[in-house]
Image (spheres, grey):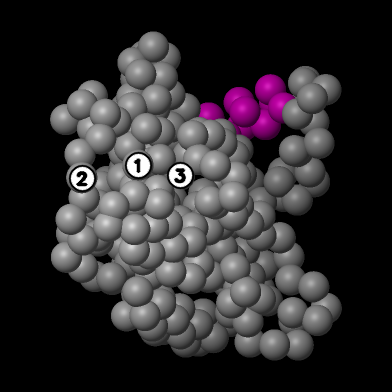
Amino acid sequence: MGRIDDIDLTKTLPKEESEKRVLAGQRRLTHLRLLTAGLLPPHQLGPGVAVLFEGFDAAGKGGAIRRLTAGLDPRHVLVRPVGPPTAEELRHHFLWRFQRDVPGRGEMTVFDRSWYGRLLVERVEGLIDDKTAKRSAAEIVEFERTLVDDGATIVKIWLHVSAGEQLKRFEERAQDPLKQWKLTEDDWRNREARPTYLRCLADMVEWTDHAHAHWDLVAAEDKHYARAAVIETIIERWTKDLERRGVEIPPSRGEDYLA
């Protein structure tokens, strides 16, 4: 399965160390966000930033997104949860429903699941065939290339957990009255289709990892490690893209610990 098999699920991080790194990352993210929003010198709007989260159910997407956005002013970031398409959306091209939330210059959108549902759940559920999936992947690559060429930064995160860890988290949710709502019959059914998901995941990464929008595959077996790794990965991708575009990034306190 290529890069999927290379994910080291044994990576861990003590809670205290994770919280320290997450806090440092949040400070740096705030600095980058203020800079790209035109609120820091030279007061010019920077590239729009789209962060895409994908992963197995209970992989920790929600926790990672909460920590990513915790230090940001709510006016400066849009979190877009993505569910099944509506009847109206099904009448259009599959990318149509995402257009309105694509960030413009100076904006930021975090997608909790994304257009990659086309290559995962829709393919696994048999809603599209392999030929359509491959054509859709090419359309996604072209869509992302167009966004990048138009001035956007795209960061794509896959959070990976083992089948055993996922089952453990499912059982914990089932016992927690405050988390039971997160667990549905579809979640249990999707677990049974894990081999198919893994095959489609490998194809997705192979078909859509490209120079202007790489996939970052993050080991999420340990939540403390994953939360710090996600923030630091986004900072690295964001910084590199700004530097590629000739943006001079002033230092910030948040860099001290990460360095």
Residue type at mark 2 is Pro
CA separation, marks 1 and 2? 9 Å
Q: Is residue 257 left or right of residue 37?
A: left
Magenta residues, start to end: 164-173
Q: Is residue 96 magenta?
A: no
Q: Under tag 3, what secondary structure?
A: strand
Label of residue 250 in the image: 2
For the residues bearing labels 3 and 2, Cβ distance under 8 angstroms? no
Q: Of label 3 and label 2, which has the lower sequence position? A: 3
For disc 1, the marked residue is: 31
For the residue marked with disc 1, what is the amino acid? Answer: His
Q: Which mark is residue 159?
A: 3
Q: Amino acid at mark 3?
A: Leu
Q: Nearer the viewer, residue 208 or 129?
A: 208
Are circles 3 and 1 on residues that touch, CB within 8 Å? no
- Judged from the image, the secondary structure of the residue bearing numbered disc 1 is helix
Helix, strand or loop for the magenta stretch, by majority: helix
Q: Does residue 121 sit above or below 220 in this rendering?
A: below
- What residue lies at 77% left-to-right and 20% top-to-bottom? 175
Res 230 label: none
Taking the magenta stretch, the answer to whether it contains residue 166 is: yes
Q: Earlier in the sequence, mark 3 or mark 1?
A: 1
- Image spot of residue 140 (x, y percent): 45, 78
- Mark 1 or mark 2: which comes first in sequence? 1
Q: Are marks 1 and 2 in contact (CB under 8 Å)?
A: yes
